[in-house]
Amino acid sequence: MKINHLLGIGAVAFAVAACTTNPMTGRKSLQIGTLNPQITSSAVQQYQQTLKESKVVTGTQAQMVKKVGNKIKTAAEQYYASIGRGADLSGYQWEFNLLQDNQMNAWCMPGGKVAVYTGILPITKDETGLAVVMGHEVSHALAGHGNERISQAMVAQYGGALLGSTISNAQWSSVFQQVYPVGSQVALLKYGRTQESEADEMGLNLMAIAGYDPRQAIPFWQRMEASSSGARQPEFLSTHPSPGTRVSDIQKDLPKALEYYKKAGGKV
């Protein structure tokens, strides 16, 4: 069986046809919309496999993860509904789980499947710190960063293909796993610096809409940096913004986020 993918009829025409604009940041990116069903289906399978291979934590901390996750989800739904794009989120199947793992990490698969590792909880400290993390990770999914990465990989490998060409299931699986490695290794997926910065901006707004103080994002990232070990690569060699750049960008984005926080009843 083969999967049909619209890969474009030429570099320029393809780029225009697949151009997507983020409604919160205004950034344009290359995303092949016809890939979304396959991406979501593969993400669900990958998430279920990860849960089987991991120890899913229950109890107070897990409930906090679900509570914060659902508040971020509701904030996203409120924002998208307010701009008349609530239908954009109709395909999301939200799920929030806490996994026993010492890694200081969390992630959100396309379609809303979220995992938080216990190793990051000492850095988040409380609900607000957790909202920084979950807002950031959910934003990767909302912004279609997985589709963007996969679309880029598809173009790199099959760029000259004609409209209506096909790739096999094996080829699709290979492309998907380049972006989202198998099983527990999914935690190692990397986004580009532009995508990380966009997720910071969106996450800041989402946590504010959810009623969490966005100003707490700065001390969280400072704690995260302080907890890192080993020499840091120069920013131009890293997929993440440098600590100084990240804090500087957050400071620039705070005024808008604080407006959302004030509307949510927060004290500014």
Image (cartoon, rainbow, N blue to C red):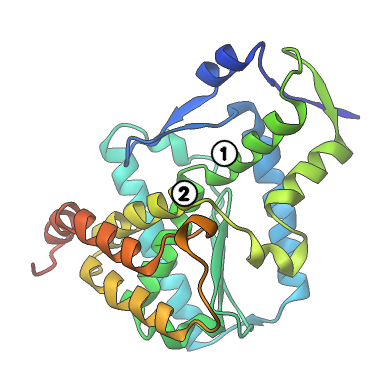
Residue 241: % across, % down: 42, 60
- Whether residues under marks 1 and 2 lie with C-beta atoms below 8 angstroms apart, the answer is yes
Q: Is residue 242 above or below residue 205?
A: below
Q: Which residue reaches farthest right?
A: 1
Q: How many residues crowd around disc 2 within 10 Å: few (fewer than 14), some, or many (20 or more)?
A: many
Residue under numbered circle 1: 148
Question: Tag on residue 134?
Answer: none
Tell me if mark 1 has few (under 14), some (14-19) or many (20+) residues whose alpha carbon lies within 10 angstroms of its own: many
Q: Which amino acid does label 2 sit on?
A: Gln
The residue shown at (46%, 29%) is: 20
Q: In which quarter of the image is the C terminus?
A: bottom left
- Toward the left, the furthest residue is 268
Quick one: SS at disc 2? helix
Q: What residue type is labelled 1?
A: Glu
Which residue is at a point 46% across and 44% down the rendered structure image?
A: 143
Foreground residue among 67 and 103: 103
The N terminus: image quadrant: top right
Residue picked out by circle 2: 195
Left or right of 90, for residue 166: right
Picture quadrant of residue 118: bottom right
Rendered position, 235 above or below 36 = below
Work out whether mark 1 precedes mark 2 in sequence or the reverse, and give the earlier one.
1
Q: Distance between the residues labelled 1 and 2?
A: 9 Å
Front-most of residues 30 and 77: 30
